[in-house]
Amino acid sequence: MTNMTNTASHAWAALTAHSQTLAKKHLRDLFADDPGRASSLSLSFEDILYDFSKQRLDRETLELLVRLAEASAVPELIRRMFDGERINVTEGRSVLHVALRRSTAPFPSARMDVMPEVLVTRGRMAEFADLLRSGRCQGHQGTAIRDVVNIGIGGSDLGPKMVNQALRSLAHPALGVHYVSNLDGAQLAPLLQTLDPRSTLFIVVSKTFTTQETMLNAETARRWLEANLGDGIDLSRHFAAVSSKPERAVAFGVGAERVFPIWDWVGGRYSLWSAVGLSLMIAIGPHAFDELLHGAERMDEHFRTAPLARNLPAVMGLIGVWNTNFLGAATSAVLPYNESLKYLPSFLQQLEMESNGKSVGVSGDPVGGETCPIVWGELGNNGQHAFFQLLHQGGRLVPCDFIASVRSDYPLPGHQEALLSNCFAQSSALAFGKTEDEARQGMEKERLPAEQIAALLPHRVFAGNQPSSTLLLKSLAPATLGALVALYEHKVLVQGAIWGVNSFDQWGVELGKAVASRILPAFAEPSLAAAFDSSTQALLAYCRQSS
Amino acid sequence: MTNMTNTASHAWAALTAHSQTLAKKHLRDLFADDPGRASSLSLSFEDILYDFSKQRLDRETLELLVRLAEASAVPELIRRMFDGERINVTEGRSVLHVALRRSTAPFPSARMDVMPEVLVTRGRMAEFADLLRSGRCQGHQGTAIRDVVNIGIGGSDLGPKMVNQALRSLAHPALGVHYVSNLDGAQLAPLLQTLDPRSTLFIVVSKTFTTQETMLNAETARRWLEANLGDGIDLSRHFAAVSSKPERAVAFGVGAERVFPIWDWVGGRYSLWSAVGLSLMIAIGPHAFDELLHGAERMDEHFRTAPLARNLPAVMGLIGVWNTNFLGAATSAVLPYNESLKYLPSFLQQLEMESNGKSVGVSGDPVGGETCPIVWGELGNNGQHAFFQLLHQGGRLVPCDFIASVRSDYPLPGHQEALLSNCFAQSSALAFGKTEDEARQGMEKERLPAEQIAALLPHRVFAGNQPSSTLLLKSLAPATLGALVALYEHKVLVQGAIWGVNSFDQWGVELGKAVASRILPAFAEPSLAAAFDSSTQALLAYCRQSS
């Protein structure tokens, strides 16, 4: 794999030179120069239109970016992932979340076929989901389970929670599915107040079954069941687990037949397609879950086979590299114009920042350039009334992904067209802005006095030239959503290849955990605080005097 | 007011020179050099400890920053705000949200006393809230109102919603309070499915009573009431309003006695203390709402009177300027370690980015430097398992605000100390990192083979030097929360003064609205699409073929 330190490559130099030429052109010019721009700078895949014509690039940029991808061995990394090679080199693992979407064996090869266990697990999940959905899964004294609480954090929470919200119009009407992640008792405690222990099932999701947050929440759940149902209860009626350490789950009190496996070739942030998605499958049913998988599988196939220049994940990844490394954008905003996608920004934050928020390359050398931007965002329509001021007039370059669906799952007269008109208007206003002449003419039409026009004019000019893409989906059908998520997953791989980092490890989460385990005992034993820096000492002292 | 284009000032130059000296020091060095650092670089105010010792600065930095504040007329702007001068110059308005927290008249002056109307309104709010809280407020055919839906967006949503979540442990047990903002029917429609029209009251919050999102949602609510309760119903039993245009609210169908005023000297993002907070007062009661106000009022008094070097909002604002303009940070992360503060990042995103996301100064000239950073964040404990990888090893400078409370409103055995130990551990790990030697020694203790140690070493080093502040509250009591929000509000004023922008207007929201109103008719009349750029045309065409 090439390392980005090789920024002296021909492809990189060509892009640098090209970016200097292009910098002179405003998006207004780019649109004026090329009437066919919207069609030549967009791609579609099944029910997704990807319009990147409002990015600050032209056809030549794309050609140069494709050359960079080839020079960075992007096609080779794609092939190696699908072949099951251990591309997660620092952990010595294959990267096979794509297997979780497949319906056919063998994969990745006859020699190393993971599909039998994938298919068996999917079948077990469906059986368990159907049991719950039909009301035949019984809790204490035969009460039917009516609420399912997923206890997990990070990848064991965000993926299923995000998709569950996105597909909530399909949710089983009589089952409540809840997500608990935070160590803070202020998440679990108020939820428990609303639940009946006799009819509640907890799914504990942790690869290692040692994750501090998840285990503490699981223990509190167990204590709550015991306190409310009596000591002698059969806990196994109220727990299921997803883990690669089934023996630990069984020791905790989960019945062996309710422990679902997860494999070391699936990273947490790529795992919603596995048994980590069990809560989701319970909510939407095995059939819709299968459609989600099929949509992702079709995107996988597109990613594996389409030429780079017409490959959605490749183009999306390359555009991100262009914005980050050649235009200097420090952040990237995700703006869904669909309430059901409200957790998508958080999900993508993890997917992108945990995968590519690294500055040491696969080789062990510093990558020598910027890598993953800060990914942030909110529901777009709400953002308009909050932070869009800065996008329009703050002077910072913030590439945006606008995401909307044409059809609404909750149609109300007049709402959907108004929503879409706002989505299209914002990207247009960000791109084209409002010139001084236009602003002056507008105020003259409002019949403001000349003095006021002069004073307000600079405040009512919009520089424009803020780049964005629009992902327009026909609807939020499960298959379309599956394709959308897979699109972003593969985008991450493309960028990781160009930046030269391993997108599939996360060493950066280790240190904080280790320090926390050293600090915790100092709450009970104040003398231990002396080992820490003066700030930590002062914070601990403030806790003692305040509690 | 000075404009930041005056970066040639002595104070600015001194800070630039100082930043070059300080750049050579790691936070490890700064802590080693000064054993008293934690106490000299922290401030406390009532039940809030503000520890900024893990910022990349020293006592000299603070002195120089205070000089910059003086040179930028910060004290003068503070005085002018409290005196009621029209510091919102582009709109010719005073900025008096501080009046909303006061208990005494006259204010700001005997000549221009806004307190009588503030106090009368507060009294009317309390009366209405008590009516609802006591079950005496009747809907259709005498049914007691049990659900209140706040319809508003931006400042008419985020503030009350954020505080409502923060103080939910105080919420009335028998009243549901809900927030609807998004144009997307996928927010209002599923909520309506859970409500009983006979016992539901809508509060429509819009200064102008013309906000597109709010009016469309309000009309849908009215149609839902009519469809479910019959045409002849008395709509006024099911609506209240907050607006500066009461006649429009009355025309909509709200009873005049249920229209609460808002004034042009309160910006939307500063308005939760006004009748915009009615839904909040209904949830938590007039007494807790008063405590919230009192806490903010005490922070106001601190801000007005404390010397800059010991003034929390001033110091917080100056540290943000230091990070943005002298260290080059493009973003700022808000990381609450308290589930109840889950909407705080979104609230601060609006407060800061809408206020200071500007690049044209009060004078009308470009400010000539960076202004507001991108404000983003998530619940901290969840973030650890999502995007903290990038904070630790991504190589980007991201100043963080850690926010936690010592006492929990929902105590569970073991949770709170584990949560706080994570909060303190993360800021410590970000600041001090892990050197190559430490990483090697750690792996030697794990008894990894030498070859593996060599391969993993660069991936297990943490550069550290990532700056943060910690705001540690004794608890999330209403008064403490009020002080916290006022602290951030005033921080924004301080930064606005230094950047030379008007923090109280928002011209940048106008263009998108105007373009949306031009695009909307093209959904019904396709021929109108020809007036738009080729991208907008293509998006509209995709909608037509997909719907």
Image: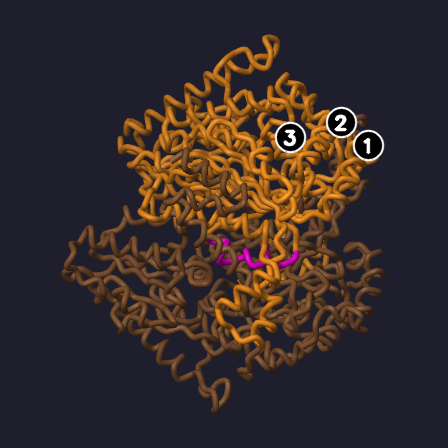
Chain colours: A orange, B brown
Q: Residue at x 72, y 35 (%)?
A: A499
Q: Is residue A4 above or below residue A433?
A: above
* Dots 2, 1 in contact, CB < 8 A: yes
B243 lies left or right of B316: left
Outermost residue, bottom side: B110
Q: Is residue B298 visible?
A: no
Q: Earlier in the sequence, mark 2 or mark 3?
A: 2
Residue extent of the magenta highlight: A382-395
- Residue A9's tag is 1
Q: Residue at x 32, y 68 (%)?
A: B248
Q: Residue at x 61, y 19 (%)?
A: A82
Q: CA distance from mark 2 to mark 1?
A: 8 Å
Q: Position of residue A300 (x, y in %)?
A: 55, 23
Q: Position of residue B333 (x, y in %)?
A: 61, 54
Say if labels 2 and 1 share a chain: yes
Q: Is residue A142 above or below residue B496?
A: above
- Residue A71's tag is 2
Mark nearest the camera among 1 and 3 is 1
Q: Earlier in the sequence, mark 2 or mark 1?
A: 1
Report in which chain the residue with disc 3 lies. A
Q: Nearer the viewer, residue B320 or B436?
A: B320
- Residue B41's tag is none
Q: Is residue A199 visible?
A: yes
Query: Under tag 3, what secondary structure?
Result: helix
Q: Amino acid at mark 1?
A: Ser
Q: Amino acid at mark 3?
A: Leu
Q: Amino acid at mark 2?
A: Ala
B296 lies left or right of A128: right
Q: CA distance from mark 1 to mark 3?
A: 20 Å
Q: Which residue is mark 3?
A: A493
